[in-house]
Amino acid sequence: MRYSLTLGRLPLSRMLACIPNTAFSLPVPVGERLQLARGWLILGILALIGAGLFSVLLVLARTPYVQQLVPVADLFHVALVVHVDLSVLVWFVSLAGVLWSVNGSERWMGLAWTALALAFVGTAFMCVAPFTGAAVPVMSNYVPVLDNQAFLYGLSILGLGFALLCFRSMAAPSRIGSELHGTGALRFGLNAAAVSGALTVMCLAWSWYSVPASLQDKAYYELLFWGPGHVVQFTWTLLMLVCWLWLATLSGARLPISPRVAVLMFAVGLVAVFAAPLIYFSWPVIALEHSRMLTWLMRFGGGLAILPMGLAVLFALAGAGTCTGAERPLRAALITSMLLFAVGGLIGFAINGSDVRIPAHYHGSIVGITLALMGMVYALLPRLGFGEPVQRWANRQPWIYGGGQLLHIIGLVWSGGYGVQRKVAGSDQVLRTTQEIAGMGLMGLGGLIAIIGGFLFVVLVLGAMQRRHAQEAVA
């Protein structure tokens, strides 16, 4: 028995020793691409700052007893719209811009700078919109909006910037090379994400052309963003998978997959996206079948590459040694990203009805992607010419942010089991039992911890940027 147990331990170490040390990483950008990546990173950090400010109002508005001190009615929903669009839409678009700038070539740089400028202008309009007059919140899925002229202008300008970003990234990719290696595999993954983004823009244009303008606001925006909202999830998950491989390499893990297998997984993750135009051809946008097919596409097609890629990274982490120094924040971001994304995916199978288990599901998935992107920011800061974040706190930040979000999600699942409805706050939540109050109280506690973790990330990144600028000034 002892002999069999010993053999049970041996295969992992032997298998790891036989794995070729493939480095999944990209070289440091130079010239204009370096400045472009810096610009997209600055926009992403500014978006997180704005989202953090609005998230304070959100958590307070849904926390028992504290909520009575906050004027919730319209303030909650307005804050929710701006928070979601900044923390998901603008943040993801910005980090996609960073990664595509690192990966791209020097061609079509005028188009690249135009995309960045449009994204900045659109974001600014969206942030000031609540202060420009009446702003009626429309809680549509994927992209909630404010029925406000400034906000709609800003959202349209941001969308145009994203369209230019995607098409420029497709038109000016870096060469993968004839001899495939880890760098080429990541380039393929980023190129695949750009193709998915371009298909998202095409679906948005198709929906805009097809949805009757006579519909009420809620129905109109729900149909407008349903298709592209599902398709763009493939873009974000492909970017997350690129980050997982890159972070695993940078944190000292030996991945048990070759570059060719990685390319195959990225291709599998992309191929399902091409079913979206077929769905648009087959059913009108207003048809129930159209919505159902897009939901099934994301549910079954979206996980084709995630599971095998995730298992490969888990296997690498299981056999990796203890990391030290600058590797530790990257390892922490990778582990928490995978944990939150997995929790969000599992919760998706427990959804039944319209309660707060739905935001628990997409919070897990979105936060999983966000943590991967945060880890990449830590890795890219010195590569983009900035300083390194304070290591002591950078090691803790993913655990604080991820742990808070996990408590937040558990509270939502707990409350959702008792029927607490989504997209409501204050007395509209109708918290009747001790269990409901406890669940939403845990949600509030986790949310506040996550806010602290998000604030800490912004402080660490700004500090790294400032130290570099200070060093340049002294030099």
Image: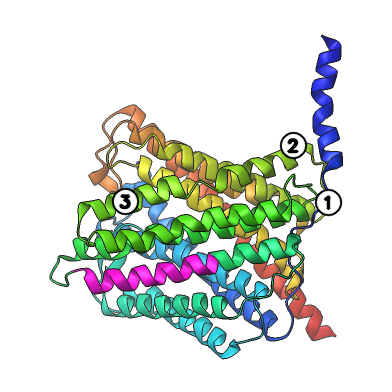
Residue 305 position (above or below residue 81): above
Q: CA distance from mark 3 to mark 2?
A: 37 Å
Q: Secondary structure at mark 2?
A: helix
Image x and y of residue 31, in percent: 72, 85
Residue at point 87%, 40% (across, down): 17
Residue type at numbered disc 1: Asn
**Which residues make up the magenta segment?**
193-211
Q: Amino acid at mark 2?
A: Ala
Q: Residues within 10 Å of mark 1 (few under 14, many from 20)?
A: some
Where residue 75 appears, as percent x and y from the top left, is 30, 61
Q: Which mark is residue 318?
A: 2
Decide if residue 352 is on the left or right side of residue 45.
left
Relative to 428, does residue 475 appear above or below in the rendering?
below
Residue 193 in sight here = yes
Residue sitting farthest toward the left = 214
Give the residue at x 38% y 39%.
440
What SS does tag 3 mark?
Answer: helix
Q: Is there any visible trace of residue 441 in the rendered image?
A: no
> Is the residue under label 1 in contact with that under label 2 (CB below 8 Å)?
no
Q: What's the CA distance linking mark 3 and mark 1? A: 41 Å
- Using the numbered discs, state the Cα–Cα distance from disc 2 to disc 1 in whole angstroms: 16 Å
Q: How many marks?
A: 3
Q: Is residue 138 magenta?
A: no
Any mark on residue 21, and which?
Answer: 1
- State the SS at label 1: loop
Residue occupying image coordinates x 44% and y 59%: 273
Q: Main secondary structure of the magenta part?
A: helix
Say which residue label 3 marks: 293
Q: Where on the picture, by quarter, is residue 144?
A: bottom left
Q: Nearer the viewer, residue 369 or 199?
A: 199
Quadrant location of the N terminus?
Answer: top right
